[in-house]
Image (cartoon, rainbow, N blue to C red):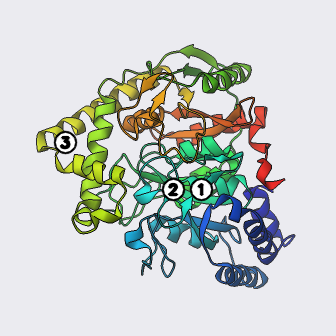
Amino acid sequence: MTATELAGRIRRGELSATEVMEAHLERIEAVNPRINAVVTLLPERAMEGARAADEVLARGLPVGPLHGLPVAHKDLALTRGIRTTFGSPIFADFVPETDALIVERLRAAGAVTVGKTNTPEFGAGSQTFNEVFGETLNPYDATKTSGGSSGGAAAALACGMLPIADGSDMGGSLRNPASFCNVVGLRPSPGRVPTWPDVAPHPLSVEGPMARTVEDVALVLSAIAGPDPRSPLSISEPGGTFARPLDRDFRGVRVAWSRDLGGLPVDVRVTGVVEGGRRVLEALGCAVDEAEPDLAGADEVFKILRAWRFELAYGELLKKHRGQMKDTVAWNIEEGARLSGPSVGWAERRRVELYHAAREFMDAYEFLVLPVAQVLPFDVGLRYPTEIDGVEMETYIDWMKSCYLVTVMGLPAISVPCGFTPEGLPVGLQIVGRPRDDLGVLRLAHAFESVTGHGKRRPPVVN
């Protein structure tokens, strides 16, 4: 069942939260040993939470939109009393005394915590593996990666181990794993889902929802969006905005279609699947033109600001624990340490210029549509792709440009299932909206999903 249907049945008394939790724990027990998506599991605590949810309903008390739904939190999010490792051996036994804001809101909306989902070390790179828990495998082909850094969340959703999940996204970490695992991941507008605690709230990094359907993603967003004084960038619009119906007529809506976002290398098999998405948009009545905004300098902007944030967040850890950090994390921190004030200043200035260029481009087009990832899910033993279509990648993140260049624009973006290659690997379509038009993005993704139904194709591992 979808999360929306489960939540409705629980509220109406047609299912108990206890029954729902038991079913999900059974699926976790059956499938997780093969996929390794849920890495800290708390079955007794989860069942206690489910029974408490049933008691609230029995007493006739008001409940939130996620009441009784099982959820697991990305292992980057602080969870009070629950081990939070950040995928790092440095924090293998760390138990926080506070919840992250997104965890607070999910619980306040009635969701019941099952445990934590796997992530790469400090969320670095879109391949979910670490020295604490190992690799999360792709449910559609267990020799492949689930993507990342919200790879555990995406794989758990695809397998039916969870109905909803949370994640975060700097360079594609909600979108890439959604594409690789045939689920839906929304990168909200910066500030839409407030982030706390945070060393320096910044528009590159956001938190957001994942689920198996667009409607379910909107349901979760309705619970986690909205202002909070602890987050200086938070948007004042309430989360209830996203409880509105998603149906809309798209006839005549102008859409910019980009195969490669201005010349990025893209695996021909990805292009072959995504081209079918263009025909779907046209069938919905959209006026589709080949166009993309000018993103000159966006690659350098992202790399500078990412390195600056890595040094800010993990620089002191590197000094004390270098031997326990993976090479790519250490490299990214050291890149940040080498930055000058003027270089960071240039990146911030150019980021603002790129935002306004994108905003003006989106005056002509309501949506920009392109591939989520430039590659298919790749071998889980490969730490990151080193070339695409004969083009060598300079760093461990270069293969993610189709996502992280969108990040720099500061616009909301979603990954929605677009289809499969002949060998059965999922491919996602990325829909980018106007500034703060998260609802518009959800509505076009919902229309696309309703016509195609690709997200209903379950992975072989659960059959």
Residue type, label 1:
Thr
Would you say residue 438 is visible in this rendering? yes
Which residue matches tag 3?
344
Q: CA distance from mark 2 to mark 3?
A: 30 Å
- In the rendering, at what x and y percent does residue 172 appear? 48, 43
Could you tell which of marks 1 and 2 lies nearer the N-terminus? 2
Say which of marks 1 and 3 sits in front: 1
Does dot 3 land on a helix, a strand or a loop?
helix
Which residue matches tag 2?
129
- In the rendering, at what x and y percent does residue 240 appear? 58, 56
- In the rendering, at what x and y percent does residue 96 appear? 42, 78
Residue 310: mark: none
Of the pair 423 and 23, the residue shown nearer to us: 423
Residue 136: mark: 1
Locate residue 56: give its quadrant. bottom right
Would you say residue 240 is visible in this rendering? no
Residue type, label 3:
Val
